Structures are given as C-alpha cells and as structure tokens.
Image (cartoon, rainbow, N blue to C red):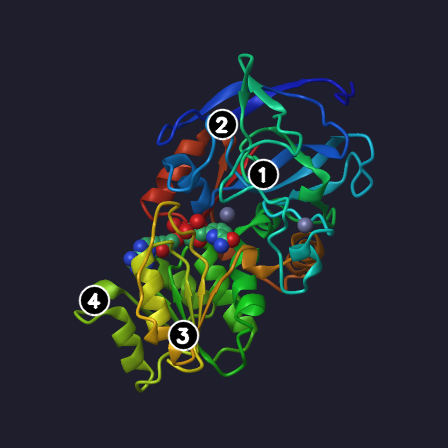
C-alpha cells in the first residue's frame, strides 16, 4: 500500500539534549511539501561531525535527528519536484546545491546559501519541521537527518545516483570520502611529485590520503596519535606514518626535519583541534606551502597565529565538503566506486544494525573504527 501523502511512523535516533545519548524512538514523518522529497534511508555512516552535534561542539537545535552521510530510495515527492522520482536511489546532500546563489554559480564556490550550518537552524526552508515525537517538533541536521528510517529533504539537498551503487560503500560519498578526496584534489589541487602531510587518519583523513595518492603525490606522511590507524593509511597510499607522541619536538619541526628543512608542499588538518590546525599550517613550506583545514573547528574556538606564517607566502584554506559541488560531483564519485576506481573497503570497518547506533559511536570514541555504517 502506498505511503505517499500520508504521515509515516518509523524509528529514529533522537538526541534530546547536548551530550545526551542517541535514543531510538518512534517518530512521525510528515509527507513532503512542494519541492521536498521523502526518502527511505537504506544506510547511514557515522561521521565525527555527528559526534560534534551530539556533544554540543557544533551548535545545533535540540531535540535533533543527526546523521548526514547516507544513501536511500525516494519514497515520495512533493509538488513540483522534477530532479528525482519515487524509487530512485539517492544521496541526501548535507551541503545543498540550489544552482542559483553566488557560491553555486561561482566555479570555486560550494557553500550554497541554502546550507544550514554556522549556525544550524534545523528546519525546512518554510521554518517548520517534518519530524515530530509525541506531538513535539524534532529538528533536522545539516539539511539531511539520516539516523532515521525516513527523512524529508528539500529538492536542493538530494541527488540521484546510479542504481548499481553498492550501499555500504557508496554511503561514504555522502560525506567522508568526498570531503577528504575533494580536499586533496579540488581544494589543494595536489601536484604530482609533491609531499603531503595528513593530520588525523580517520575516515576523512584516510580519504585525503586516497586523494593525494590519486593526484600523484610522491610522499604522503600520515600523522595520528592512534597507531592502529597506520596499517590502513599505508594500504591506501601513505608512505610514512608518525605519532606526535613519539617526539619531544613539536610535530611541525619534525616534519621540517623529515623534508630537509623545506616543510611539506601540502598539509591537511583532519582532526578539528586548533593546536593541530596551527601545527599543520606551520608544517608546510613557508613560501609555497598550502595548508587545508578540513577538521570542523569547535563553534566556540578562537585561535591566534603569527602573521609571519602567512606573510612569507603560505596559503591557508578551509575546505567544506572537499570544495566539491554536491549535485554535480556526487554522481561521478559514485560511478568511481562502482567502477572500482576508488577502493573504499578499508574505510568501512564496521556494519551494524541501526539499533546499535550507540555502539557505533562507542567504537568511534575508542578509536576502534574508521567508518561504521548503520543499516536501517
Ligand atoms: P575521526 O574521529 O574518525 O578521525 C580523527 C582522527 O584524528 C583519529 O584517528 C584520531 O586518533 C586523530 N587524532 C585526534 N587527536 C589527534 C592529535 N592531537 N594529533 C594527531 N591525531 C589526532 O574523524 P573523521 O575522520 O570522521 O572527521 C575528522 C574531522 O573532519 C572532524 O573534525 C569532522 O567534524 C571533520 C569533517 N569535516 C567536514 C568538512 O566538510 N570540512 C566533513 C566531514 C567531517
Ligand atoms: Zn560528515
Ligand atoms: Zn546555492
């Protein structure tokens, strides 16, 4: 029996307050309004950004349904939707692409003005939510909300992908892989023969490693305090891996020593701490080095750096979703997975049923997982 046009009751993981657990409860999901799409989520990956939403490091509105890295099937569409139809396999877009605003029109831009972060309101364009629990509204997260069996997104925040997309791998195209891969290939534009340093070897940092290798970097130095990440980093292309805990010197000095005093050509901070952002900046060559901030800074953090670090010529860039344009680039990245251009197998260390979401976050906290994929 068709569910189109009807309220759907289903399971979702709600965080009711900052630092509270993910509680699986029954919610009501209203039908999509005009230009909205209701999606049955098939799988959702656990990204550190969801953890930041849960612990309050990133400002969100509670109660909230987090999750933003997913793949699903269109259940129904609202009036006027033409980009997808019921039954299509789709990826929800945590960075929408409306195609009309200045960042969408600028070839170098991607932070669509319809994006919902910094600060996140957690509501649809009309200021309401399609989610409710016991009659009270529940907010959405980063235009998506995927820790739920059904979600509703605006048509700007969904893209059709090839039906052959393998769900447990292609799910990572919704955030982690694209972010890391794009940070190397699009934001930094890593050149063949260069030396790269990647700070943080989680799902996103390892995807930066893949992007550096694909770009032809000759040295890729992985940096993490958790040495359990090193074998995977090497499998994916890191030529050396080091832990800052093994050195007395600051890690930026160690990287200068490892490169005959030159510093690396490209450095990437993929952790989200201000001290490692400063260390990554100082690690690259003082004149032509490029440092890319990928890790999400805590909402409340400020940092101070010496202007000399930039004055001598260094470039310091941020990278949101790897600088990629979601609607344009995601279908091609999914094809890359189908055609085995990218091997994402080492990134997916755990596949768990949705009900075990808290176990998935525990694995992340203990440093025992790279990506956990929850299957609905
Ligand atoms: P993760 O927690 O899986 O990986 C982080 C890694 O950093 C872990 O392996 C840690 O052991 C390591 N680490 C922690 N502290 C240090 C330290 N002091 N020195 C060296 N290594 C350390 O996270 P992730 O890969 O899912 O995400 C990484 C960051 O990227 C996180 O801040 C997340 O919010 C952000 C992100 N940004 C975007 C974007 O669009 N810019 C998208 C997705 C994720
Ligand atoms: Zn993410
Ligand atoms: Zn736009």
Q: Residue at x 45, y 33 (%)?
A: 357
Q: Quadrant of the C terminus?
A: top right
Gap between marks 3 and 2, in whole Å?
A: 40 Å
Gap between marks 2 and 4, in whole Å?
A: 39 Å
Tell me whether circle 2 and circle 4 mark residues in contact (CB < 8 Å): no
**Of pointers 3 and 1, the one earlier in the residue sequence:** 1
Q: Which residue is mark 1?
A: 43
Classify 307 as above or below 294: below
* Left or right of residue 257: residue 328: right
* Left or right of residue 119: residue 143: right
Tell me whether circle 4 and circle 3 mark residues in contact (CB < 8 Å): no
**Of pointers 2 and 4, the one earlier in the residue sequence:** 2
Tell me whether circle 4 and circle 1 mark residues in contact (CB < 8 Å): no
Q: Which residue is mark 4?
A: 246
Task: Tell me where residue 89 appears, x and y as whole percent.
Answer: 72, 42
Residue mark closest to the camera, 4 vs 3: 4
Q: Residue at x 55, y 23 (%)?
A: 11
Please tell me the numbered disc located at residue 148: none
Q: Which residue is mark 3?
A: 239
Q: Secondary structure at mark 3?
A: loop
Classify 45 as above or below 246: above
Q: Which residue is mark 2?
A: 13
**Of pointers 3 and 2, the one earlier in the residue sequence:** 2
């Amino acid at each position: 029996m068709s569910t189109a046009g009807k309220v759907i009751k289903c399971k979702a993981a709600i965080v009711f307050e900052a630092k509270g657990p993910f509680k699986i409860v029954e919610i009501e999901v209203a039908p999509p309004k005009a230009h909205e799409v209701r999606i049955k989520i098939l799988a959702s990956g656990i990204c550190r950004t969801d953890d930041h939403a849960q612990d309050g490091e990133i400002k969100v509105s509670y109660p909230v349904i987090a999750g933003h890295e997913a793949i699903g099937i269109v259940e129904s569409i609202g009036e006027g939707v033409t980009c997808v139809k019921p039954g299509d396999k789709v990826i929800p877009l945590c960075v929408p692409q409306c195609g009309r605003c200045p960042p969408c029109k600028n070839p170098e831009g991607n932070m669509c003005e319809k994006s919902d972060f910094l600060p996140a309101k957690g509501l649809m364009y009309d200021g309401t939510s399609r989610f409710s629990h016991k009659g009270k509204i529940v907010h959405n997260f980063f235009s998506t909300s995927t820790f739920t069996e059904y979600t509703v997104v605006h048509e700007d925040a969904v893209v059709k992908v090839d039906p052959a997309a393998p769900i447990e791998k292609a799910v990572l195209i919704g955030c982690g892989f694209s972010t890391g891969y794009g940070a190397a290939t699009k934001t930094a534009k890593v050149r063949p023969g260069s030396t790269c340093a990647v700070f943080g070897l989680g799902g996103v940092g390892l995807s930066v490693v893949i992007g550096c290798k694909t770009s032809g970097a000759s040295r890729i130095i992985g940096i993490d305090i958790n040495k359990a990440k090193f074998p995977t980093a090497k499998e994916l292309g890191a030529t050396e891996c080091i832990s800052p805990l093994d050195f007395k010197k600051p890690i930026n000095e160690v990287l200068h020593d490892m490169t005959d005093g030159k510093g690396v050509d490209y450095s990437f901070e993929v952790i989200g701490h201000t001290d490692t952002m400063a260390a990554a900046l100082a690690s690259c060559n003082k004149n032509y080095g490029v440092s890319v901030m990928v890790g999400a800074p805590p909402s409340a953090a400020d940092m101070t750096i010496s202007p000399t670090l930039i004055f001598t010529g260094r470039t310091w860039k941020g990278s949101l979703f790897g600088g990629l344009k979601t609607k344009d680039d995601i279908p091609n990245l999914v094809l890359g997975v189908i055609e085995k251009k990218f091997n994402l197998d080492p990134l997916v260390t755990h596949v768990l049923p949705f009900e075990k979401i808290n176990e998935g976050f525990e694995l992340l906290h203990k440093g025992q997982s790279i990506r956990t994929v929850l299957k609905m």
